[in-house]
Image (cartoon, rainbow, N blue to C red):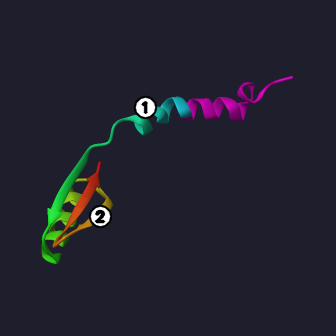
Amino acid sequence: MFDFWNTVKGNDLADILIQELPRLTAPKKQKMVESQNDNETRKAIEEYLNKGYCLVNTVQLIGSVLLIFEK
């Protein structure tokens, strides 16, 4: 009797894991930007999105906001 890994679906899954795991486990590049007002926030978000980053978190500080981007 075959186990899962000796089936077509098991082999397909193994191929996908071999292909995708290096990309998924690669360290991500993060940038933090402190913004003092709405205009700076909009400008920073637009700039980093155009560079291929994603906005992953914001931290509200006293009088400003910290934007955390990841690529």
For image coordinates 20% across by 54% down, the residue present is 32
Task: Point out residue 30 in the picture as x, y percentages from the top left corner.
Answer: 26, 47
Using the image, determine if residue 16 lies above or below residue 70.
Answer: above
Q: Which residue is mark 1?
A: 22
Residue type marked 2: Thr
Residue 6 colored in magenta in the image: yes
Task: Point out residue 37 in the picture as x, y percentages from the top left corner.
Answer: 14, 75
Residue 29, quarter of picture: top left
Is residue 53 visible in the rendered image? The answer is no
Separation of marks 1 and 2 at Cα, in angstroms = 28 Å
Q: Which residue is mark 2?
A: 58
Is 30 in front, or is 60?
60
Q: Secondary structure at mark 2?
A: strand
- Left/right placement of residue 48 relative to residue 6 reads left
For image coordinates 42% across by 35% down, the residue present is 25
Numbered disc total = 2
Residue 36 colored in magenta in the image: no
Task: Point out residue 39 in the picture as x, y percentages from the top left corner.
Answer: 14, 75
For image coordinates 37% across by 35% down, the residue present is 26
> Which range is magenta?
1-16
Magenta residues, dominant SS class: helix
- Left/right placement of residue 25 relative to residue 7 reads left
